[in-house]
Amino acid sequence: MKQIENKHLTLRLVTGIALAFGLLGSPALNAQETPVRGGTLTAIAQPEPNVLTNAFNTSFSIGVVASNVLEGLLSFDEKQQLQPSLATSWKVAEDGKTITFKLRKGVKWHDGKPFTSADVQFSAMEVWKKTHPRSRNTFAAIESVDTPDEHTVVFHLSHPSLVVFSSLNAIEGQVLPKHLYAGTDILTNPYNLKPVGTGPFVFKEWKKGQYIVLDRNPNYWDTGKPYLDKLVFRFIPDAGSRAAALETGEADYAPFDPVPLSDIQRIRSNPNLAVSLDGYAWQSAYVFLEFNLRTPILQNPDVRRAIAHAIDRKALVDVVWYGLGKPATGPVPSSLKTFYTTKDVPQYAFDPKRAEQLLDAAGYPRKENGVRFTLNQEYQNFHEAFKNNAEFIRQSLKRVGIDVNIRNRDIPGHLKAVYTDHNFDINTGRWVPTMDPQVGGFRHYWSKSIAPGIAWTNASGYANPQMDKIIEAIQVEAGSDKRMEGFHQFQRLAQQDLPVIPLFEQANFTVYSKRLHGLNKAPDGALSSLKTLWLEP
């Protein structure tokens, strides 16, 4: 069967992805600079991860650490093109239903065992397809994986699947060691807390509540890297204290909005610090409000639409997020130009009067105390802005007669309440569609993404056969105009049914010391390994 070489595959199968974002920014590392070897980098990971693999939880704080230990088959470069990682080359059959990967030879797991095709087969079939909250959708087309030899893997697909190649990096497609995971419960395997990988750094120690230490992998396959001897990821719950640690030089690197947004101008003016927006394009994140459709009041779509009209999303961005974002029009961010549309997509402008009319008509008039009903709000407690975001929503809904109780939990408690117990009425937080929104954009809306106990899936319980039909048609289209029209239909129906309100498109940032060089500017750079970083003496 005729094969398509990997150089052309990037262009053919990732059509629209590479053009979806413009690179944000800063110039590349000066070619005249010579990396300095050695030293310890102190980074901040916040909140503290609860595990160190993205096999079943894709929280960004996990990825910040885990991608230094665990790797994927492919990676991205600064031009958003696919590059080799654990796979050195790949070919796609002419009918698009078979993908053959050649694996890198001589790679060893950190415990000395050889990395082979059996690890990829196990990871694809038992992890990506079964426990990963986004990849369960992304890799749905994989029917089987063959291993003709130790360095060849063949994916057999039920249909062509453009989205597979968006998800083979270290965040979406981490390869786990079969010899440590086979025959165990993936969710409770002890190596989730002390990972053994193939990456540039080796897990050394995790002191709960304080830090994680990773040491340089002396046998790393990418010769000469990493440059640093050690990574120390500190956990500093207070945002003001994180800012102080960066300003005093106690920490050198902190991704994902580590400081209070009110401090960003002061941080920018600090001569020893830099702020970068690079490294987040792959995620194309937005902040959302999700309804629990098991709550009888919220089963009425007019109540959900009233809540959408009650929230001034522009003011939310300006007041809570200091302008770092813009109001969303639907579940596909505007930066994804190939997939995005507003044509015939329902919108819910800020209109408290309309919100009150809808609530009255729905049968929920104000009582003597002015309250129509009460809802419980869960929120992703990643940092102070998410708490303030929840408070802004509480005040917005109070003005139209809806009382809201905010529940303050840590991340593990939040995940259990929302995804296991479904003990919430509204849930607010951050969502990651990625550069191809099939990867992460469908999980809120596809009935087959209802997966109790699995984080970042369909917690609302939303199920519409028409939506399922649209999503499943997109999954089998391979880059055609019909696939793009499918995404447009998806946006229209998502905004019509409104199980989720996409509130605004988020802009993330990294703060780092100017002594630090080699910052990864790839679209997934903020979640990639730190093997290219080095510190001036």
Image (cartoon, rainbow, N blue to C red):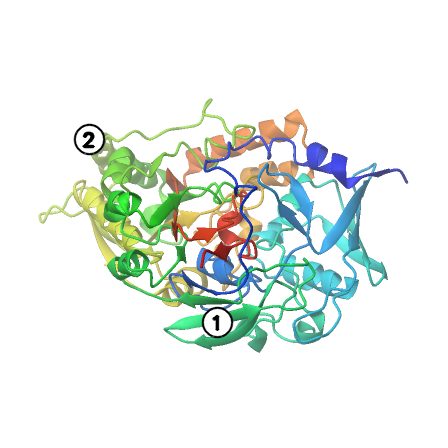
Please say whether residue 356 is visible from this viewpoint.
yes
Q: Which mark is drawn over residue 459?
A: none
Of mark 1 and mark 2, the one earlier in the sequence is 1
**Mark 1 → mark 2, Cα distance in angstroms:** 54 Å
Name the residue tied to disc 2: 353
The reply, left or right, for residue 59 in relation to residue 375 is right
- Outermost residue to the top: 343
Above or below, 53 relative to 435: below
Q: Quadrant of residue 151?
A: bottom right
Q: Is mark 1 in CB contact (under 8 Å) with mark 2?
A: no
Q: Nearer the viewer, residue 231 or 175?
A: 231
Q: Which residue is drawn at 32% across and 56% down?
A: 383
The reply, left or right, for residue 265 in relation to residue 165 is left
Quadrant (top left, top right, bottom left, bottom right) of the C terminus:
bottom left
Tell me which amino acid carries mark 1: Val
Q: Quadrant of residue 242?
A: bottom left
| Residue 245 in picture, x, y percent from top left | 30, 61
Name the residue tied to disc 1: 213
Q: Describe the element under mark 2 as helix, strand or loop.
A: helix
Q: Describe the element under mark 1 as helix, strand or loop.
A: strand
- Outermost residue to the right: 1
| Residue 218 in picture, x, y percent from top left | 64, 69
| Residue 84 in picture, x, y percent from top left | 70, 49
Nearest to viewer (mark 1 / mark 2): 1
- Outermost residue to the left: 368
Q: Nearer the viewer, residue 533 or 492?
A: 533
Q: Which residue is drawn at 56% across and 37% down?
A: 466
Query: How many marks overall?
Result: 2
| Residue 330 in picture, x, y percent from top left | 43, 34
Q: Which of 29 and 436 is in front in this view?
A: 29
